[in-house]
Image (cartoon, coloured by chain):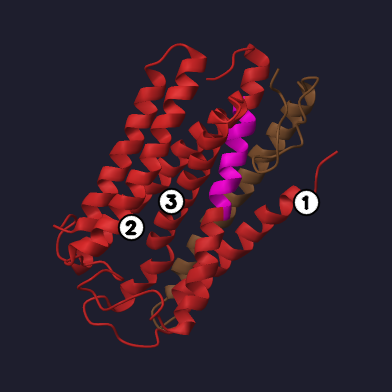
Amino acid sequence: MIDENKMYAVIAVLLIILLGLFVYLISIDLKLRRLEKRHREPGIDNESDTASKIKNEP
Amino acid sequence: MIAHYKWIYKAVAIVLLTYALLAGLTVKLPYELPVIYESIRNLFYHVGMWFTMLFVFLISFIYSLRHLKGFNPDHDRVAAQAAQIGLVFGMLGIFTGMFWANATWGAPWVRDPKLNGAAMSLLVYFAYIVLRSSIADEEKKARISAVYNIFAFILAIIFIGVLPRISGDSLHPGQAGSPLTVAGLDPSLRAIFYPAVLGWILLAVWILEIKVRMSRLHNTLTERDYD
């Protein structure tokens, strides 16, 4: 099926789109990281993620 | 200093989803399914949307519970962002499902308890968003929406997981009246299905992490508690 009817072209296109979106997401993540560093608030652990936790409660 | 371990699950998400796309489109189907044919491959993508939606709704539920135990505004923040992302994946599930239903059942929307249950669940969560935006007082907003969110998750489970199974006439696999189940799936398809679902879930967690960090940063910059 893959060779017969040029299905590989579709798979390649989808793969490029998917990988392109991943690269975009990574660049957003990195940009956000730079902003976080610049505006680091005392008392908040900016390295903590959504799973582990926070202590910015008074 | 970048915490490298936090990139591990993101790399896993990329690898799993790339695998799901390549393997999912190229795997030779182990059997010829009547009516469904090649569209069974949608299993890796369409069904992944729903598993992911329920997973982030579960995160939202857990953080709402945590918010009610200690009233940490950051827990409410995670709950709110997770609910939003769940809605995005739910909408994707609905729209992809409409295409698949049109191809197999002959209409984009059929009389099926699973479809209506899914639509009801999305409405319940849209109401959560509306509820949040309608309360100005931040503390009140957080508490009331946390309580509502707990009901919302239980309702979603009932609408999607329970009612279609006891109604007895759902067209979806795994329900009464349909012979197909995930457990009865051919191992060659299951070997793609489970990694695909995990990949979608990790992708959603990644987006959630970014949105929560954005919201925290926004909070830091504006000195308000929420946005």
Mark 2 belongs to which amino acid? Answer: Gly
Per the image, label 1 sits on a secondary structure element best described as helix
| Residue occupied by mark 3 | B54
Location of mark 1 (residue) = B5
Tag 3 and tag 2, C-beta contact below 8 Å: no
Q: Chain B shown in which color?
A: red
To which residue does mark 2 refer? B161
Q: Which residues are magenta?
A: B202-215
* Quadrant assignment for the N terminus of chain A: bottom left
Determine contact: label 1, label 2, CB under 8 Å: no
- Amino acid of disc 3: Leu
Identify the chain of the residue marked 1, using the numbered disc in the image: B
Report x, y in % for residue B4: 80, 49
Q: CA distance from mark 3 to mark 1?
A: 26 Å
Name the amino acid type tagged 1.
Answer: Tyr
Which colour is chain A painted? Answer: brown
Front position among marks 3 and 1: 3
Nearer the N terminus, badge 3 or badge 2?
Answer: 3
